[in-house]
């Protein structure tokens, strides 16, 4: 039975892997696609303007919302899986991490197409890499897999800082294109959670897992709320990179959330 189930899962995963490869290829081709579209509609070789194609934008936004709903829902399930007493159910939920990442990547891909952004996917990729490194170090320290050395804590702090910077740029771009403040509220929750969990990991507190779970659930709920409230988007004006970080921070400080 196990072998049969395994072969079924392998066959089922093949088209998904091919689809993921297609998405990765489009990730590198998106800037050129946007430039060609701009030239075709007579707006010149500019990376952030696009034709007022309501149907295409609406379809991309709808696809993005579906994938993001699934991703954030799985994030909630993954966060609370450690508190489920049934070992089989908890183990099944803990194995949804790959599906979560794929759904999130697909959602961000279609969202980038909807807002014609060349920064969203690159920022998300960088944030994901540094978030994973920081999370692994904190988990290893929290569970005593290795001692909290100065070097490990410094690496974790640097990775967390880079992750939060790019997460801010992502949230700010989504807010500017949709007008939904919950994108930024989710960022504030994530930033507070990351800093608190790092301190708890250094102190060796048992509250590490609980605080991390609460933060993930609250951030996921806010993101779901933001996606649900997003009924339309505008084209991204670009500039969501490190060179313009100070400008975006100043803009956020002038707004009330």
Image: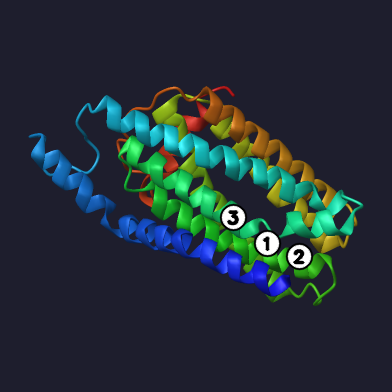
Say which residue appears at 75% left-offset and 49% top-offset.
79
Label 3 crowd (10 A; few <14 / some 14-19 / many >=20): few
Where residue 96 sits: x, y (%)? 67, 56
Question: Is 83 situated left or right of 96 in this image?
Answer: right
Question: Of callouts 1 and 3, which one flags the residue occurring earlier in the amino acid sequence?
Answer: 3
- Real-space Cα distance between discs 2 and 1? 6 Å
Cβ–Cβ below 8 Å for labels 1 and 3?
no
Where residue 237 sits: x, y (%)? 30, 36
Q: Quadrant of residue 199?
A: bottom right
Which mark is on residue 139? 2
Label 1 crowd (10 A; few <14 / some 14-19 / many >=20): some
Mark 1 = which residue?
135
Secondary structure of residue under mark 1: helix
Question: Of callouts 3 and 2, which one flags the residue occurring earlier in the amino acid sequence?
Answer: 3
Quadrant of the image for the N terminus? bottom right
Where residue 177 sits: x, y (%)? 39, 30
Mark 3 or 2: in front is: 3
Regarding residue 79, the answer to whether it shows in the image is yes
Mark 3 = which residue?
99
* 52 and 234: which is toward the camera: 52
Say which residue appears at 45% left-offset and 22% top-offset.
231
Say which residue appears at 34% left-offset and 28% top-offset.
234
Regarding residue 198, the answer to whether it shows in the image is no
Label 2 crowd (10 A; few <14 / some 14-19 / many >=20): some
Secondary structure of residue under mark 3: helix
* 169 and 226: which is toward the camera: 226
Which mark is on residue 111? none
- Real-space Cα distance between discs 3 and 2? 21 Å
Cβ–Cβ below 8 Å for labels 2 and 1?
yes
């Amino acid at each position: 039975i196990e072998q049969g189930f395994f072969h079924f899962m392998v066959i089922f995963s093949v088209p998904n892997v091919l689809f993921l490869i297609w998405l990765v290829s489009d990730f590198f081709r998106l800037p050129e696609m946007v430039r060609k579209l701009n030239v075709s509609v007579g707006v010149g070789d500019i990376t952030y303007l696009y034709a007022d194609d309501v149907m295409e934008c609406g379809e991309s936004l709808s696809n993005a919302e579906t994938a993001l709903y699934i991703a954030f829902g799985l994030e909630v399930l993954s966060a609370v899986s450690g508190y489920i007493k049934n070992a089989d159910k908890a183990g099944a939920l803990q194995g949804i991490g790959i599906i979560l990442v794929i759904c999130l990547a697909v959602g961000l891909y279609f969202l980038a197409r909807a807002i014609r952004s060349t920064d969203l996917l690159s920022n998300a990729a960088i944030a994901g890499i540094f978030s994973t490194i920081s999370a692994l170090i904190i988990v290893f320290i929290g569970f005593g897999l290795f001692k909290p050395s100065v070097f490990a804590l410094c690496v974790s702090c640097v990775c967390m800082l880079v992750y939060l910077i790019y997460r801010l740029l992502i949230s700010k771009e989504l807010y500017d294109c949709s007008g939904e403040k919950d994108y930024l509220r989710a960022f504030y929750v994530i930033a507070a959670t990351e800093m608190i969990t790092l301190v708890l990991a250094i102190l060796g507190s048992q509250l590490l897992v609980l605080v991390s779970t609460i933060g993930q659930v609250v951030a996921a709920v806010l993101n779901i709320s933001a996606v649900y409230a997003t009924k339309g988007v505008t084209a991204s004006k670009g500039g969501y990179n490190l060179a313009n970080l100070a400008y975006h921070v100043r803009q956020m400080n002038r707004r009330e959330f």
